[in-house]
Image (cartoon, rainbow, N blue to C red):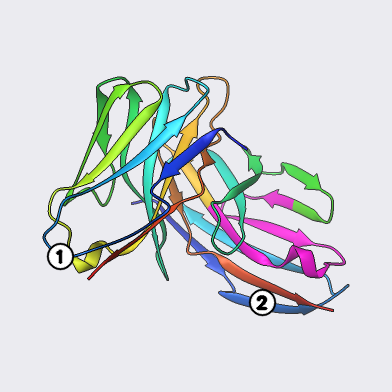
Amino acid sequence: DAGITQSPRHKVTETGTPVTLRCHQTENHRYMYWYRQDPGHGLRLIHYSYGVKDTDKGEVSDGYSVSRSKTEDFLLTLESATSSQTSVYFCAIRPGASTDTQYFGPGTRLTVL
Amino acid sequence: EDQVTQSPEALRLQEGESSSLNCSYTVSGLRGLFWYRQDPGKGPEFLFTLYSAGEEKEKERLKATLTKKESFLHITAPKPEDSATYLCAVQAGNGNKLVFGAGTILRVKS
């Protein structure tokens, strides 16, 4: 257990609505990541953060924004959800300079109708 | 562009039937190769990190090896509880990003 919680765990929403997913960690780790997982594609990086208010894009960042105002929380926002954003979203943390390993949260299943 | 290809996509084994999963990769300057296990409805669980060709790591019935082009996850005498999806990922460049393969779904029948 890497001390990561994600909320909500399941969400169904309609096309065009805004959605915010939350990742919360209890260990004050510097690095946090958002991935999406789709059949046949594996996990793909959306955005990541290397500190409070420090974020950068991953390979599939279009349509997503992130914010990190506190060390423990990393928020992923879909400004206007589309059906192509139906996926399972995972948050991950990397404890820091002493290790390159990322540890994953339990995931959020998002369905956009 | 960094790429990871895992094979086979799915593998069915009888309990006790040893086999190997493959992860081939192309990356500019490998920093690390990672193996994860993922159970249905859960997040990936870290298994191993390998950093250089020739390196090997073991955990219970699992053994991971690394060459300059690929990694193998050897499963010796598997049990039904080893059934899961096994993911491989590589880390390159500044080390902030992992590139994942699509995974191998392993089913072990008793």
Q: Quadrant of the C terminus of chain A?
A: bottom left
Q: Quadrant of the N terminus of chain A?
A: top right
Is residue B66 a member of the stretch shown in magenta? yes
Closer to the camera in the image, A112 or A90: A112
Q: Which mark is residue B11?
A: 2
The answer to which quarter of the image holds residue A50 is top left
The answer to which quarter of the image holds residue A55 is top left
Q: Position of residue B63 (x, y in %)?
A: 77, 52
The crowd level at tag 2 (other Cα within 10 Å; few <14, some 14-19, many 20+) is some
Q: CA distance from mark 1 to mark 2?
A: 37 Å
Closer to the camera in the image, A51 or A28: A28
Q: Amino acid at mark 1?
A: Thr
Report the residue at 47% width, 19% height from top: A28
Residue bounds of the magenta highlight: B64-88
Q: Which mark is residue A94?
A: none
Is disc 1 in the same subunit as disc 2?
no
Report the residue at 48% width, 39% height from top: A5
Question: Is any atom of residue B27 visible in this view?
Answer: no
Q: Position of residue B51 (x, y in %)?
A: 61, 37
The crowd level at tag 1 (other Cα within 10 Å; few <14, some 14-19, many 20+) is some
Q: Position of residue A78 (x, y in %)?
A: 20, 50
Q: Is residue A111 left or right of residue A40?
A: left
Question: Is any atom of residue A108 visible in this view?
Answer: yes
Q: Which mark is residue A15?
A: 1
Badge nearest the viewer, 1 or 2: 1
